[in-house]
Amino acid sequence: MTDQTPALRLEGIVKTFPGVRALDGVSLTVMPGEVHALMGENGAGKSTLMKVLGGILAPNEGQIFIEEQPTVMSSPMNAKAKGVVFIHQELSLADELTVAENIFLGELPKKSFGRVDWQRLYDETDAILKTLNVGFAARTRVGDLSIANQQMVEIARALTVEPRAVIFDEPTASLTDAEKVVLFEVIADLQSRGVGVIYISHRMEEIFKITDRISVLRDGQYRGTLNTAETNEEEVTQLMIGRTLDLSRNESTHELGEVALEVRGLSCGGLFEDVSFSVRRGEVVGFYGLVGAGRTEIAETLFGLREPSAGTIHLAGEEVSIHSPADAIKRGISLVPEDRKGQGLILGMNCRDNMTLPQVSDLTAGPFVSDGAEVAIFDQYRDKLDIRTPGWRQLVGNLSGGNQQKIVIGKWLSMRPEVLIVDEPTRGIDVGSKSEIHNLIRELAAQGYAVIVISSEMPEVLHVSDRIVAMFSGRVMREFTAEEVTEDSLIQAISGLTGKTA
Amino acid sequence: MKNETRANLIKQGAIWAFILVELAFFSIAGEFLSVTETAFMDFDNMLLLLKQSAPIGIIALGMTIIMINGNIDLSVGATFALAAIVLLDSMTWPFMQTLGNWAIPLAWLFALATGVVLGAISGLIVWKTGVDAFIVTLGSMLGYRGLVFMYNGEQPTSHLNWTLVDFAEAQFLGLHTATWFLLGAAILLWLLMTRTVHGRNAYAIGNNRDAAVNAGIRVGPHFLWNFMLIGFLAALSAVVFYSESGSVNPNDGMLYELWAITAVVLGGTKLSGGYGSIISTLGGVIAIQLLRKGLGHIGADTETVNLVIGLILIAVLFLDRQLNRKGKEELRT
Ligand SMILES: Nc1ncnc2c1ncn2[C@@H]1O[C@H](COP(=O)(O)OP(=O)(O)OP(=O)(O)O)[C@@H](O)[C@H]1O
Ligand SMILES: [Mg+2]
């Protein structure tokens, strides 16, 4: 490998934003045919580095080499023309347009008079979709696809050109296991064609499964590169956050109180059916299942966003009907949503205001909003969740993906709810903060809150839950206690392999 | 999948269904309430209706593109008036008078060029400053209207050319000249929006601007082209209308921008951009003209007409929202 010319080399890249030195002299070499993992905490600068490489941001200093030729990436188009394809962390699609138009956005095939060559467009798209093995067609409207399928569209974009290097920025955050397998096949295929792949993810299993080398960033600085085969999770974590983590399963137990929330026979159209469960004070109940099993929809129903078609909801023994989120909040239910950008955050508002948004009417001093109280709340949760931002005035849209997620969590925690529902709380969150969020969830339960955790990550549900509800296509398959659950039985339950409801 | 295309058809067909309802309603109501003897659905009446739809209709077609882009253009009414003045005044210029009838195409060219230039000014400002199109065109609306008044004060600008009038009043295959221009523009723009890269990019930009930028679409120049196009169309509308009337008042074209926007919205184009259709806008234009004529037919005065159109607009937007919620299990907002 050493005497090959690198597909891509970055040298001494510096990028500053007002108040932040996001990248501080980072160098990175990617060989053809290798899968190179880029790791680091939230806000370490991974996405920023890739944006520099993808022509979206111009670096303040430093140089990019493609096959040892110094290059300047002036725009995303320019980068793509030079063979560097960037698949974004956040979806970047036009949902009124078709799959084909999105895949070829900005480079639709042309005939005379600027007409679109639909035939060629659909043919080429079909060919790409075939290699991806997806269940939708070139003419499907992107807005009608699930988030996971939209992610696949995003991935399909990489295959429209003959790339030298492809950057995947947390591509698996919203993929199901089956789609992950396809993605890994796509990556293996790129690899065998001699393409250099940069792969960003916070999921260690994936990193160790598919990558050849791991480079680590910390606070915008390059910390080193490891050969995946010669290292282990501990060493990588150490390099990333400067300490090791205890990743054992949940063993702490505490007194459970009375039932805080009970759901009986809840159904909602075709989304989920006959769902019954209860959560007691001081208890963490994990909802585990594949993406699309109906878990998010249950949470949304409890939070008053959807209207149940059958069944009842009881809070502290009393039957209630929840008509709106305002209703839910008043009754002490909070939801940390899955889609932080769409539902949880106002990107153009600053960190503090986002965090205190749901309670701003309570934080008043006379007729005015009390600034001091708001800042105090922000400071408290910034420290608790280790949110990396230069200050509360920073716009949330400028934070790194993981830190945005932390703001959402802080927002609902600061409401001190009775029942807290968290949907995929650690999606896109680095290992260090992940375990902090897990501890926080346990701690909240210990203080007497009833907590529901929805997650597609098995280690996560196993780690935080007292009880686990396994779901498969809108139905509860089984309930496990923390003592009896095993990974195998859980996998069986969520793939619909066990019989009836336990 | 199938469901989706059906829902789409319903959406696009809604405006035409609405037109049918209007026709039926005014025909029946006209039997009882009409102030005249003629039936509402009279053929000549309908032809006239199409002709009368043309001035705002041609502008509304351009507005559709601007709104699909996620922008808006408030200056079209003033552009319309200024192009009309250039059209009529240029024919009185000494050198133009020596040209005989050759002055006509030249006058048209001047008027259309005026529209393109005025559009380009708005477009350039939107592109280069990044200021919202609403604000920019609010400014150019005031500015262009100011130019209109500077030209001739409160006086109308007039010039009647009989060759022009004959041309404008001509009928070909039964349709008036203005109607042909409306239909021709509609077909060309429909082709532009559905078949060309420029058109598809317009949807992409309006739908998700960041995604379009990330994909390397040059949004600024794209906006510029579209503003030039709507300027051209506003001028074309003036050319078609004033060839016949021969006299411009400095207040002409006021509120045209709002009527155009109303027609576009009735046709189902999203205010936020990314979705809409030229053909549906044509439906919206006809629906409004039908309402005006129909209400006049049954004896309502202008104020009532405006009130009714306003109420219908709100009702349509409300219905649209309800239709878009796919059912009970859909997320509430
Ligand atoms: N446009 C911007 N303006 C100001 N600061 C920014 C901007 N974009 C990024 N930053 C800052 O740069 C730093 C690096 O962010 P980046 O998005 O690269 O992190 P990341 O490593 O991708 O994190 P994550 O794992 O959470 O996605 C963060 O502190 C972030 O707040
Ligand atoms: Mg990132």
Image (cartoon, coloured by chain):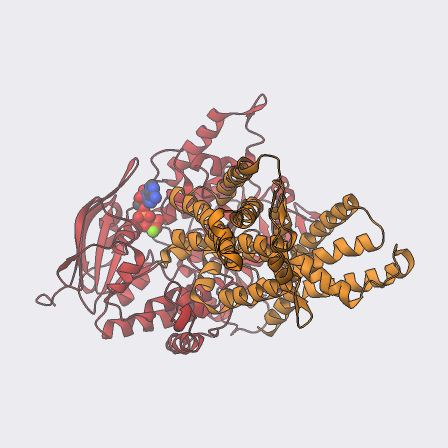
Chain colours: A red, B orange
Give the quarter of the figure containing the N terminus of chain A: bottom left
Q: Looking at the image, in which quadrant does ligand 1 appear?
A: top left
The answer to whether one can see residue B243 in this image is yes
Residue B220 vs A18, above or below: the answer is below
**Left or right of residue B113, residue A359 in this image:** right
Residue nearer the viewer, A446 or B239 = B239
Question: In this orientation, does residue A265 appear?
Answer: no
Residue that appears at 56% across and 74% down: A499
Residue B188 rendering spot, x and y as whole percentages = 53, 66
Name which residue lies at 49% across and 50% down.
B115
The quarter of the picture where residue A281 lies is top right
Q: Residue furthest left?
A: A3
Q: Nearer the viewer, residue A307 or A92?
A: A92
Q: Is residue A65 left or right of residue A188?
A: left
Q: Residue lying at the far top in this picture: please name it.
A: A366
Give x and y (percent) for residue B92: 53, 47
Q: Is residue B175 left or right of residue B239?
A: right
Estimate the x, y position of residue B319 in percent, counting from the top left. 70, 56
